[in-house]
Amino acid sequence: MKLRNTLLSLTATAMLVAPVAAQAGTTAAASTGKIASLAGMGERKSAGVKARNKADAGVVVLAVAALGAGTYGVVNAVEDNKSNGS
């Protein structure tokens, strides 16, 4: 039981430390002061959109295919063709 608790605490610590270690020495970590100093520079303005974005036919076909594949996978996983052993 003691080993299990130790492993769980090490895993939790690793999950907390990993994002900090991944960001160390990167440009994002170095630009934190730059972002804070630009806070009061000016207002952001949105750009106008000329036309409404519409989904292409290929995206719709891909979504339908993904939905069908997902449904097939769920049905195949739930369906049990094995005998009960008796």
Image (cartoon, rainbow, N blue to C red):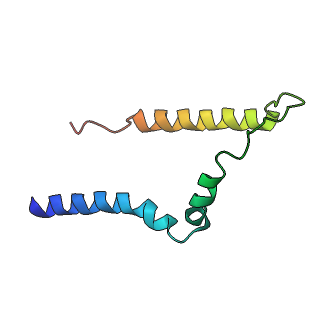
Front residue of 29/40: it is: 40
Front residue of 43/31: it is: 43
Instruction: Looking at this view, name the residue that lies furthest to the bottom.
Output: 25
Relative image position of residue 10 (x, y in whole percent): 26, 63
Q: In screen coordinates, is 70 left or right of 82?
A: right
Instruction: Looking at this view, name the residue that lies furthest to the top.
Output: 52
Quadrant occupied by the N terminus: bottom left
Q: Residue at x 68, y 35 (%)?
A: 63
| Total numbered circles | 0
Q: Residue at x 85, y 32 (%)?
A: 48
The image quadrant that residue 84 belongs to is: top left
Front residue of 64/29: it is: 29
34, above or below 66, in the image = below
Relative image position of residue 53 (x, y in whole percent): 82, 31
9, above or below 40, in the image = below
Instruction: Looking at this view, name the residue that lies furthest to the left.
Output: 1
The image quadrant that residue 21 belongs to is: bottom left
Q: In screen coordinates, is 24 left or right of 30?
A: left
Q: Residue at x 71, y 47 (%)?
A: 41
Quadrant occupied by the C terminus: top left
Front residue of 22/24: it is: 24
Q: Residue at x 66, y 51 (%)?
A: 38
Relative image position of residue 54 (x, y in whole percent): 81, 30
Relative image position of residue 32 (x, y in whole percent): 57, 59
